[in-house]
Image (cartoon, grey):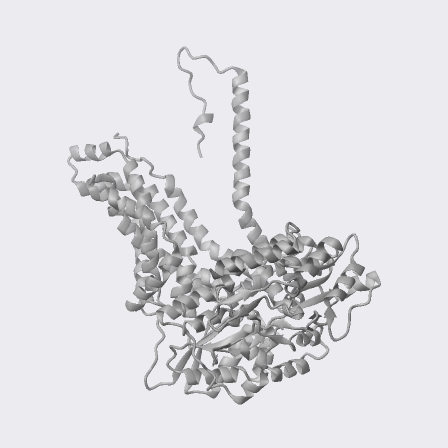
Amino acid sequence: MKRKLATVVTAIAVSGLLASCAGGGSSESSDGPIELTFQSLAYQDTTVAATKDIVDQWNKDNPDVQVKLTQGSWDNVHDQLVTQFQGGTAPDIIHDESSDILGFANQGYLADISEYLSDDVKKSISDDVWDTVTINDKVIAAPTLMQTYVVYANKKVFADAGVELPAGDELQWSDLQKAAKSVTTPDTFGVAWGLKQPTAAVMNTALGFDGTFFDVKDDGTATIDVGENELSVPEFVHSMAYDDASLDPVSLTQSGSDVLPGFLGGKYAMYIGGNFLAQQITESASADFDWTVLPPLAGSAGTVQAANPQTMSVAAESKHPKEAAEFINYWMGADNQAKLAQGDWLIPASADARKVVETETEGQTGWKELLATGENLKGAPFQKAATYPQWKDQYATPSLQQYFADSISADELAKQLTEGWKSVEG
Amino acid sequence: MTNVALQSQPLAQGTKRAAPSAKKQRRVARTFQYGALLLYMIFLGFPLLFLILTAFKTPQELQSATPAFLPGQFNWENFAAALDKANLIQALGNSAIVAVSSTVIVTLISLPAAYALARFKTKLRGIATGWILLSQVFPFILIIIPLFMVLKQMGLINSLVGLILVYSVWSLPFALWMLQGYVASIPIELEEAGAIDGGGRLLVLRVIVLPLLAPGLVATSLFSFISSWNEFFFALVLIQDPALQTIPLALARFVGAEGQVQLGQLAAAALLATIPSLVFFAFLQRRLTSGLMSGAVKG
């Protein structure tokens, strides 16, 4: 028996080794069609399906340029790309986000695709958004879908409290504070915000008050200035949590997904989070859950938020940058972008695609307001500050967490952010 | 399992029967022991139970503000979605090939090496032992790029052979360290007795040492199998072809950006991925104790 078992196990091992010898390594035939690899990070089932459809359609229409789709994951794409670039095995077409690819672009791993992009693609995206993927006049990606911070509202809680839902073209932070206060009861908080990782949210929404934080030079070095504008959003949050008691302070220690059950369960009247969370609401809410998206949050500078679009880039080492960029032009088509945006509840960077989404989602909960939050996005200085990631992890996140836990003052927060930056900049 | 302590033993001449109070104390102590054991089993088993229950819950149940411990009904949709979306069967096959192959390689190499380390007292032994320990402190991230370059030169990127090679090399030092401890614990006198009886070194190894070493070999194999089965980072970097993905890579498919997780599907996939490991462990764990010191007493 033992001998049989050993024989079987050894046979499996040997056959495994032999079988696996046949695997691996992308091949490229010299006289066959060009084969491009495309690593997609699509996550929601609908977006995965849409991605596959687009690639299949391209392959059908372009027999000479075949795109091979591989599936990556947002969670670990950075580590994967680091080794792929170093080892020269990066995919031809790379799906990522602008804040992640700037470092790769600075190291020369991404091709300048400006000469290959079609006029339609160039025209349909605002200069502010193009700015997020442009380094030293080189366009290192096409911006695709964008995330914004929006306010979701439970209509029933508002109705039960006899409070009218905020309406209009924008929602001032001061009006959000008033609304939150008026619907707060002993059983219900007016608002919740999952700010476990607070830095990105604060940096993105601070632009609504002209809070830029940094003055960045061409080489990526920067100086920091934390003034009244930069502190506006944190102070609103702090005031709602500790002066008004209308914002649940526990939610400030949780992720956006952690806070969602409380919103769906009627514990919170409003919920601030990324627009992609709408997908989870539609998937997880009970059939009678009545929700909506409120108008875009606005500060003294309007409804501006930072644009950190998802991106499609071409690896500098790709043997076929022109064909890869042609696929990106196809990918950027309004109908394709609209299909992908609806799958993830994200906002297309392309104005043409936004129009398609608007038409296709007419009458559906939340879409009109979500799209409105995407009308005023622009690049933020922090995205181009070379040591921002280090500052974010070592100083900004812990300092903001301390402030949101009410253990330091706004002045101390500003001091810690400033001194932290000086420390990482050397 | 026979409980020797509970078997009645004939009292030797002159010994007194244990006093009732001592018996009672023993009973109380035993009750506490079993109670502690039960609590420990619950502590160990709860994550698995939670995983099973989560796998059967609907998205609505998982996002409920008042979560229930038990699912409302046993809903198999998560399993169907997991199998469909993550190509789980193929990933299980790949993981099995990689884990079994690296386990066999590690065991075959570490067995003679561990014996040599334990029995031959040379200067090399101290150096080798030091190097084994030192190799365990290198973080993955430190070696991944050089390793990637080396494998690329060898044409082993994006192939299961490359992954098997990496896992074997990665598991080998610790397996060697474990196994040489087991070898060292076998009394050398047993081998000497075998030699006096006329057995050559290989015969002594096969007839005396190997049966006594069986539990150690099983423990080492389990360590090697589970570490290969669960490994994520090397697989992430070295494997790009979807057809060659291992189970941990397939599971990553259920985690999105900004902390989004398709929890029900992830739990279902993780449960399916756990089963082969559990079967492997259940099959081998009996052998962890069987044969322990068997044959040590010459009849």
Q: Position of residue B117 (x, y in %)?
A: 24, 43
Taking the view exactly as shown, the residue that stands out farthest to the top is B14
Q: Residue at x 73, y 57 (%)?
A: A240
Taking the view exactly as shown, the residue that stands out farthest to the bottom is A119
Q: Quadrant of residue A107?
A: bottom left
* Residue B257 visible at all: yes
* Residue B197 visible at all: no
Q: Quadrant of residue A86?
A: bottom left
Q: In this image, A405 relative to A185: left or right?
A: left
Q: Residue at x 62, y 59 (%)?
A: A195
Q: Quadrant of residue A355?
A: bottom right
Q: In this image, A232 relative to A112: left or right?
A: right
Residue A138 position (above or below residue B216)? below
Q: How many marks?
A: 0
Q: Position of residue B196 (x, y in %)?
A: 16, 32
Q: Position of residue A34 (x, y in %)?
A: 39, 84
Q: In this image, B137 relative to A375: left or right?
A: left
Residue A244 position (above or below residue A204)? above
Between B23 and A197, the one nearer to me in the picture: A197
Q: Position of residue B73 (x, y in %)?
A: 65, 57
Between A367 and B70, the one nearer to me in the picture: A367
